[in-house]
Image (cartoon, helix red, strand yellow):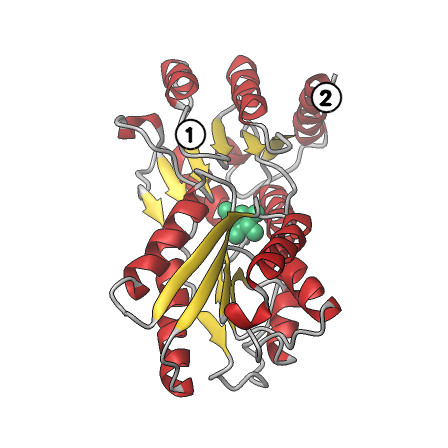
């Protein structure tokens, strides 16, 4: 039923363009373009901002967007991609919830001659021709930024030893794997640091709360020096629990997180979080630009990473450039 209404919406969109005689700057590119977009879910503020970015960018480009939300289920993403193939959309864009298990359906898209753009997350495959392009963060670099901040902080504090708890995003997803790998590659050889536990928080605020309860009950606040969270939503859940237990966040325990949503950046400014590594959800314009080029028959880049950095308690946090999304 949902698919039928998505198709109807796109058909109405196309009808509107033709019947109103909309004059676009390049009608041959814009008028007929339909993008099939499989979003993986709505687990975080980042994801919601990312969906909005895709919708706004498609509208601004004059493209029809057929969107399906998979509610964290890989099977639903596979079904959505199959329906886009059946509808013969011009380009398929999707954000893979996990890295493995896509070869079959992407082979079907390839046979149908529909280019695929990976947005936000990567896939693991031996056949690079299964996708045309990837637009999204360099998650490994983000993990490294988190580790580099920790080294700088430990130096500034003169810390001799720090116990770290890591709260991970969705198992086997690109940001989970690479934010962990980047972080570990930076701190692994420094004897001052021990990761005492890595727990799965699935990128959810509610799970961040559960993880904080579990870790505090197991180790006690005095045994935990640092919490590294793979996203802001989980860290905001941690923050709620720390405050309930009268633990002084950002002082008793160093808090490092990734994303840069407004609530987390505000908590950094309030001294409750120590480091927010940026990851922008605003990928829509870059994706639609690739779609436009593909439809014009132009060659496109295989990998596009947005420019990102980190906000930390070493920075001038009054600077207007320090803001969340
Ligand atoms: O893939 C990007 C990650 O997914 C973001 O860091 C997280 O907030 C989201 O759910």
Instruction: Determine which of the numbered discs, if any, sits on residue 116 in the image.
Output: 1
Label 1 – label 2 distance at C-alpha: 22 Å
- Per the image, label 2 sits on a secondary structure element best described as helix
Q: Which residue is label 2 attached to? A: 2
Residue 65, compared with residue 108, is above or below; it is below
Position in image of residue 230 (x %, y %): 50, 55
**Quarter holding residue 263:** bottom right
Image quarter of the N terminus: top right
Residue 315, compared with residue 280, is above or below; it is below
In the rendered image, is residue 201 in sight? yes
- Per the image, label 1 sits on a secondary structure element best described as strand
Q: Nearer the viewer, residue 254 or 265?
A: 254
Badge 2: how crowded within 10 Å, few (<14), some, or many (20+)? few
Position in image of residue 174 (x %, y %): 42, 43
Q: Nearer the viewer, residue 230 or 94?
A: 230
In the rendered image, is residue 283 in sight? no
Position in image of residue 27 (x %, y %): 53, 35
Residue 116, compared with residue 284, is above or below; it is above
Image quarter of the C terminus: bottom right
Residue 192, compared with residue 39, is above or below; it is below
Asked if the residue at label 2 sits under 8 Å from ligand 1, the reply is: no
**Quarter holding residue 83:** top right
- Residue 133 as seen in the image, left or right of residue 228: left
**Quarter holding residue 21:** top right
- Residue 34 as seen in the image, left or right of residue 152: right
């Amino acid at each position: 039923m949902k698919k039928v209404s998505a198709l109807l919406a796109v058909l109405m969109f196309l009808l509107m363009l033709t019947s109103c005689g909309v004059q676009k700057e390049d009608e041959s590119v814009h008028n007929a373009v339909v993008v099939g977009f499989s979003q993986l879910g709505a687990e975080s503020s980042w994801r919601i901002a990312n969906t909005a970015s895709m919708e706004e960018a498609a509208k601004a480009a004059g493209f029809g967007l057929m969107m399906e939300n998979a509610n964290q289920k890989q099977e639903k993403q596979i079904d959505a991609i199959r329906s886009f193939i059946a509808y013969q959309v011009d380009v398929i864009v999707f954000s893979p919830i996990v890295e493995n298990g896509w070869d079959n359906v992407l082979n079907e898209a390839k046979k149908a001659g529909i280019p695929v753009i990976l947005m936000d997350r990567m896939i693991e495959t031996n056949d690079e021709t299964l996708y045309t392009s990837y637009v999204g963060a360099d998650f490994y670099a983000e993990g490294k930024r988190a580790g580099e901040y920790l080294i700088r902080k430990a130096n500034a504090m003169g810390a001799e030893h720090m116990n770290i708890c890591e709260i991970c995003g969705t198992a086997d997803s690109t940001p989970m794997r690479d934010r962990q790998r980047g972080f570990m590659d930076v701190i692994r050889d420094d004897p001052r640091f021990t990761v005492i536990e890595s727990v799965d928080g699935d990128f959810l605020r509610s799970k961040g709360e559960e993880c904080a309860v579990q870790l505090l009950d197991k180790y006690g606040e005095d045994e935990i020096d640092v919490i590294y969270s793979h996203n802001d939503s989980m860290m905001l859940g941690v923050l709620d629990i720390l405050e309930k237990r009268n633990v002084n966040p950002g002082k008793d325990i160093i808090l490092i997180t990734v994303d840069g949503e407004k609530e987390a950046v505000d908590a950094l400014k309030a001294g409750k979080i120590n480091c927010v590594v940026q990851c922008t959800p605003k990928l829509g314009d870059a994706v639609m630009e690739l779609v436009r080029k593909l439809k014009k028959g132009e060659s496109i880049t295989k990998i596009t990473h947005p420019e990102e950095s980190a906000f930390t308690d070493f920075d001038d946090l009054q600077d207007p450039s320090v803001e969340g999304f």
